[in-house]
Amino acid sequence: MPSSALTPAIKDEIARLGCADIMVGIPSYRNAATIGHVVRASQAGLVQFFPDLRPILVNADAGSPDGTQRVVVETEPPGYVEQILLVHPTNRLQRVSLTYPEVDGIGGKGAALRTLFEMAAALEAEALVVVDSDLRSIVPEWIELLAGPILKGGYDYVTPLYARHKYDGTITNTVTYPVTRALYGHRIRQPIGGDFGVSGDLIRHYLAQESWTPDVSRFGIDIWMTTTALIGGFAVCQTRLGAKIHDPKDPGSDLGPMFRQVVGTLMTMARDNPDRWLTISGSHDVPAYGFERLVDPVPLEVNTLRLLSQFHAGSLTLAETWGRLIAPDNCERVLALAAEAGELAEAAAHRLGLSRQSGEGTSGGSMPSTDELSDAVSAFHFPDDLWARVFYDLLVAVGFGDVEVERLVAALVPIYFGRVGSLVIENRRLSEEQAEEHVERQAREFELRKPYLVERWRAAEAAAAKAGGAGSTRSEEPAR
Ligand SMILES: Nc1nc2c(ncn2[C@@H]2O[C@H](COP(=O)(O)OP(=O)(O)OP(=O)(O)O)[C@@H](O)[C@H]2O)c(=O)[nH]1
Ligand SMILES: [Mg+2]
């Protein structure tokens, strides 16, 4: 990890605070509208469930101009805990909001967490709970659900389980869940959920890592935390938090950069740790804490027409790059699908009176719903096996090809849009449970196809060793 970049002000703050047993950390950027609720719930959770511990709440903010930090320092805990439950915390709750420093010139969620790790380590906290600042559905019990397995159960890393809408969490559903499961063998359903519990031991391990990259300073942080915990052999469990309601994103318009940062980090870590996944086959359940909850997540709209158009548009500029990265048979299938996506989207846009590229309304009329849009392109289907093969082809290219990871992952984005579009179309008539079964089906496909990855990886490894002379293996000399 890059050397400590804590500012003198943060060091002074740490000296003033001294020690803590349990810390809640909240990264933020322009979250004044929502962070108050998160701070209130966290404070109540600390006092209500851990009255005997020394608690601290730290907000690591990007210097938001909207008053996020002011909201944090002015938000008081709810009075009911002491008034009704007569719980009197032994130790006063400390509440701090600070502007975190960049890491090697890069700011972002990961840089914020880096400051939180350093603070938790300096304060010798036994457990750090990290929660997102745009959460609407957090309740005080989340703090216990995320810290309990660490403080009472001896676990090191607690990942969330949520009831999410079938169209929410597309990067998770299409990449991080199935790939983490197939590579490392742990069925962690939300490897990048954003709400985590981390033990003091694991924080120290994080701070000792050399694998921090610019993407980890941004949205690569979540998959980096999960993968580092798995590779390091730490005890991992899940915890049932109920619904995740937060500022939602449409996968076609908001998630491109996040996809690149998350998937770039996942691939770089796989490239650098082949010994941790090459020999693993199959997967096992990861224990879950907390009582089951029956909740209906908030619906989300997705513009499937735009996803299909973007897939097609990507094929027009990236066909040559895809040809260098993807095995010929698979590439041919992807190009045929992209052409089909373009035709279907164009015909549907014409029928619905929408502009072709954006899928937006052209005459000020209201935008059709996800179902209407998906019905109009219902013939489109991107098969599970092709998605798994293409992903694995790219992983091999990360290991042994001559295209740098950033470019390679950028080239995958339009294909991801095609895959997500297909899943949304396929799931439009399904319940959340049935859609979940599709996610499982796809994860099994990644496991089933893993021998394809291992075979290609080993062949490329052998070819690289031959070309570079005896002893020049991939793991000694990572190809960038
Ligand atoms: N400190 C800091 N926090 C950030 C930055 N960008 C995002 N965050 C915080 O990171 C958390 C997650 O960001 P979101 O934009 O909600 O992303 P997400 O919920 O993981 O993404 P989806 O689930 O795909 O919607 C929130 O608490 C944000 O405030 C940043 O640049 N700096
Ligand atoms: Mg969010």
Image (spheres, rainbow, N blue to C red):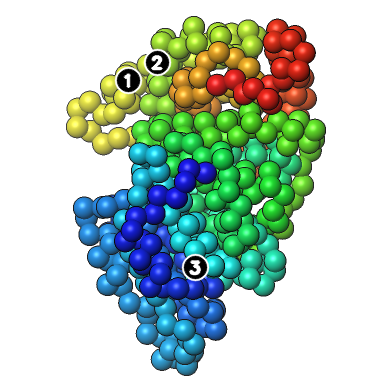
Query: Residue shown at 55%/21% (left/top)?
Result: 480
Query: Residue shown at 55%/84% (left/top)?
Result: 52
Whichever of callouts 3 and 2 sits on the residue coming sooner in the sequence is 3
Q: CA distance from mark 2 to mark 1?
A: 8 Å
Secondary structure of the residue carrying tag 1 is: loop
Query: Residue shown at 32%/20% (left/top)?
Result: 357
Q: Which dot marks residue 190? A: none
**Pointer 2 with pointer 1, Cβ within 8 A:** yes
Mark 1, Cα crowd under 10 Å, few <14 / some 14-19 / many 20+, is some
Mark 2 vs ligand 1: CB under 8 Å?
Answer: no
Q: Which residue position is annotated with label 2?
A: 313
Compared to residue 390, the image places residue 256 above or below, namely below
Q: Which residue position is annotated with label 3?
A: 123
**Pointer 1 with pointer 3, Cβ within 8 A:** no
Closer to the camera in the image, 298 or 27: 27
Indicate the position of residue 332 as horizontal and vertical percent values: 59, 8
Compared to residue 73, the image places residue 368 above or below, namely above
Closer to the camera in the image, 117 or 71: 117
Between disc 2 and disc 1, the foreground one is 2
Q: Amino acid at mark 3?
A: Leu
Between disc 1 and disc 3, the foreground one is 3
